[in-house]
Image (tube, rainbow, N blue to C red):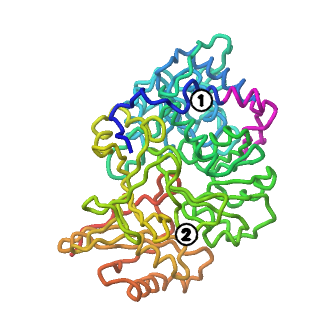
Amino acid sequence: MPHAPGDVSRSIVNPFAGRDVNWLLDYRAESRGDHPFLIWEPFEGARKVWTYGQFRERVLRVAAGLHRRGIKAGDYILIHLDNSPELELLWFACARLGAVAVTTNTRSAGPELAYFADNCNAAAAVTQPELAELVGRSAKGIGWLAVTEHLLEGGEPPANLRPDSEARFSSLDGDPADLPQLPADPWRHGSVQYTSGTTSRPKGVLWTHGNALWGARTSAVHENLNENDVHLVMMPSFHTNARTYSILPTMWVGGSYVLMPRFSASRFWDIALRNRCTWASMLPFFLKALAQQPVPTHHFRKFGLSANEPPFDELFGVHSIGWWGMTETVTQGIIGDALQRNRPMTTGRPAAGYGIRILREDRTPVAPGETGHLECWGWRGIQLFLEYLNDPAATARSFTPDGWFITGDRVTLEADGYITFADRDKDMLKVGGENVAASEIERVIAQVPGVHENAIVAQKHRMLDEVPVAFVIAAPGLTEGDRAGLADRVMAECKAKLADFKVPRQVFVVEDMPRSTLEKINKAELRKGLPAIG
């Protein structure tokens, strides 16, 4: 496999030469102009539908409005929005101008927002009424701030949160004839997403237009999407999963997608049935919540999540494919087969277009049955992100000398060639010199009756370095008596099935746990409250 240079070589032929995100939108507006593209399902207020033709027309007007406010090619726009039509319009409007859409997690605190705005040198920002004061106070270097005119879940904001006329998102409107001409260039910078930053400051993952098109085309193939599919999007669209696992591949095939403000178990089936949804990215959290209610006759044919064909498939009557990917890999680098059966609870096999290797500590390849460090190969700016924004040192640290991306994940190479996700490197505990995978303990605890969700984190120990501690959320509907004895049952199961050094020192039964992107448990926050012991 060829060496991947530190600076992308333009000597290779880009698979999207002569194309960019604007080409894709134009193509679909011309070929599927009257077909529904974006279907907005707010929790309050009216459902709204944009065809491909209507969506492009609105994108052009928003782009012209940005241009009228001084935004030009190369400018960075901070988009601090939850799922909404405005976020979608802005993402594509930035592409039309050659500006860079910087989508940020709306759970971010003020200092994090200040860092994002400073790191990308944001020229302007757009947010929603509930967050306008925070963004205005934090992003001090921006030229202007625009605010949407509805609350997160739909509905009118109260008077004290309504933006004035000049700050309203609707004021970002102009004549498309005034837009500057922009030659198609797949190497042009297109968007930035910030990593969760649980162990260090978040890094801005910079994608090119070619990255976005790679994600669109590759995910469409992986998921076996077609023009008749209706993709239900509940994941945050400031994140890779919604963007290149759902929205862009839907546009690639000319299908439709339904956008919800967020996942809601009580609204899921109503929205899915009304729109005849056929595809959805799911999380275990979603599946567990939906399993608590009757499953109606529906139109879903596929779910995508972290594991192939979990037991939930029988309950929901779908075929689920597993996948692994990161913001840095743009789409799935490991994938289940959408057209064949897969071994249940594995993640998948290496995806076409990516190099996958799994290494021991001494950097030799693992044998079947072993777990090792996952590294991924691809061309930066196509299969892999271009760079970490304004952080060349972090970019350099993330690649091996021969050009492989160091994912920070550990996976198991199964005897039959499937790959199963094991842990993040940072989820490996060092207990008295023994390596302990948090996931191994979590799998045991997950089988205890009455456990809804659990997480293992490391507690500092003066003698052993670290010891495992368990946090457990009880299953809904558990009686008070069963809940009272849950910690003891968890401890007993761990003692029966795990080596003594792997048994949690404490089990905390909690109502909820801190979350990061995609509802992942934020283990760094859990660790903060644990004092050193021993």
Q: In the drawing, what numbered circle is on residue 345?
A: 2
Magenta part of the protein: which range?
25-52
Identify the mark nearer the N-term, 1 or 2.
1
Q: In the drawing, what numbered circle is on residue 21?
A: 1
- The part of the image, by quadrant, that contains residue 195 is top left
- The part of the image, by quadrant, that contains residue 113 is top left
Q: Which amino acid type corresponds to the residue marked 1 in the rendered image?
A: Val
- The part of the image, by quadrant, that contains residue 215 is top right
Secondary structure under badge 2?
loop
Answer whether residue 223 is magenta in the image: no
Secondary structure under badge 1?
helix
Q: Is residue 154 above or below residue 286?
A: above
Q: Classify the position of the N terminus by image quarter.
A: top left
Q: Position of residue 490 (x, y in %)?
A: 45, 82
Q: In the drawing, what numbered circle is on residue 38?
A: none
Q: Is residue 64 above or below residue 337?
A: above
Left or right: 42 with respect to 21? right
Q: Which amino acid type corresponds to the residue marked 2 in the rendered image?
A: Met
Left or right: 57 with respect to 190? right
Q: Position of residue 178 (x, y in %)?
A: 64, 10
Q: Position of residue 499 (x, y in %)?
A: 33, 83
Q: Nearer the viewer, residue 121 or 424?
A: 424
Q: Residues within 10 Å of mark 1 (few under 14, many from 20)?
A: many
Answer whether residue 26 is magenta in the image: yes
